Image (spheres, rainbow, N blue to C red):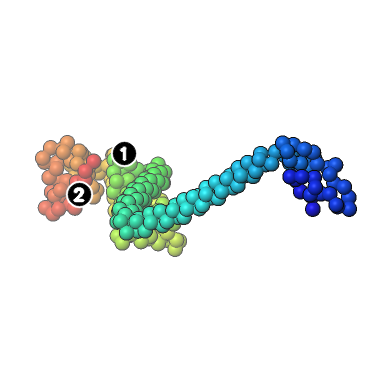
């Protein structure tokens, strides 16, 4: 085995091959004469040792940093676990309070939106009913008073069915049945029942009662209709008012109702 450094060439003499030519003298010693590799040479053994020591120190430093980093990770895991435990034990009531507040706010907003939707739906229903009622009134031969009063008298009896059609309802809010066994329409209701109950609001083309605009007067001050507007009643003198309410011939009440404008 070749030695990198000899104290004397005698150490390699007596070998099968003369190796003394591979060494050169340097500072009283004999160094194996080989070319340097990657900057390292046998002549600079001290430098090589230094590099190796630096590499070892760097490796030890990396090990230390790795250990510290591992410790930090474990510490973070522990801290996170402690934090979660702390939240569960110390702040659970606060979190529950915040949750309850958010839920209450959501429910309040939902209720507000529900009421708004209900209001809009009701407005839409009213528009649909009023539109159909006005259409029917425009087709009927009504007195001027009848055009003003009848819509107010019958409005509470009207509703919309599931299909969105305007119909007539009874006192329980149930749709009434018409002559054709379907839901009673506004037009059927007005031309049959309303006309029968309030004839003086319909113009009598034969020249009878009701053709004078709705007060049913016959020139003698008597009133044969069933209703009279408050404004018309107030415009009469006391004698005429009495004749409207009491039949002068029989002395009995006429049954005439004074209704608001």
Seen at 19% across and 46% down, the residue is 258
Q: Which residue bears the numbered disc 1?
A: 144
Horizontal side of residue 260 vs 72, given as left or right: left
Residue at image position (28%, 43%) is 149
Looking at the picture, how far across and down is residue 118, in whole percent?
36, 50
Report x, y in % for residue 36.
Answer: 77, 38
Tag 2 secondary structure:
strand
Q: Looking at the image, is mark 2 or mark 1 earlier in the sequence? A: 1
Nearer-the-camera pick, 108 or 257: 108
Q: Is residue 124 visible?
A: yes
Residue 30 in the image: state x and y as whole percent: 76, 41
Kindly identify which residue carries mark 2: 257
Count of marks, rendered view: 2
Q: Is residue 241 left or right of residue 196?
A: left
Please tell me which residue lies in front, 187 or 30.
30
Secondary-structure class at tag 1 = helix
**Quarter of the rendering containing residue 203:** top left
Picture coordinates of residue 71, whole percent (x, y): 47, 53
Kindly check if marks 2 and 1 are in contact, taking CB atoms under 8 A apart as contact.
no
Residue shown at 80% from the left, 41% from the top:
23
Q: Looking at the rendered structure, which numbered label has been put on residue 17?
A: none
Is the C terminus in the top left, top right, bottom left or bottom right quadrant?
Answer: top left
């Amino acid at each position: 085995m070749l030695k990198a450094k000899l104290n004397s060439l005698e150490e390699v003499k007596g070998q099968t091959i003369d190796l003394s030519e591979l060494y050169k003298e340097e500072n009283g010693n004999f160094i194996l004469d080989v070319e340097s590799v990657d900057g390292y040479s046998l002549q600079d053994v001290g430098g090589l040792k230094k590099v190796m020591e630096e590499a070892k120190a760097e490796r030890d430093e990396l090990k230390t940093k790795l250990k510290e980093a591992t410790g930090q990770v474990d510490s973070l895991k522990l801290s996170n676990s402690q934090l979660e435990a702390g939240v569960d034990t110390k702040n659970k009531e606060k979190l529950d309070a915040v949750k309850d507040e958010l839920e209450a706010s959501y429910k309040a907003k939902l209720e507000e939106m529900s009421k708004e939707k209900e209001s809009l739906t009701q407005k839409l229903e009213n528009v649909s009913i009023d539109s159909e009622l006005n259409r029917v009134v425009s087709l009927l031969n009504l007195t001027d008073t009848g055009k003003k009063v009848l819509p107010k008298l019958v409005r509470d009896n009207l509703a919309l069915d599931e299909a969105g059609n305007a119909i007539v309802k009874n006192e329980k809010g149930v749709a009434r049945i018409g002559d054709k066994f379907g839901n009673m329409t506004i037009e059927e209701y007005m031309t049959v029942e309303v006309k029968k109950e309030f004839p003086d609001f319909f113009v009598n083309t034969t020249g009878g009662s009701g053709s004078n605009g709705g007060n049913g007067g016959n020139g003698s001050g008597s009133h044969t209709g069933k209703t009279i507007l408050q404004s018309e009643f107030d415009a009469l003198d006391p004698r005429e008012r009495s004749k409207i309410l009491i039949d002068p011939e029989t002395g009995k009440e006429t049954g005439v109702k004074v209704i608001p404008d």
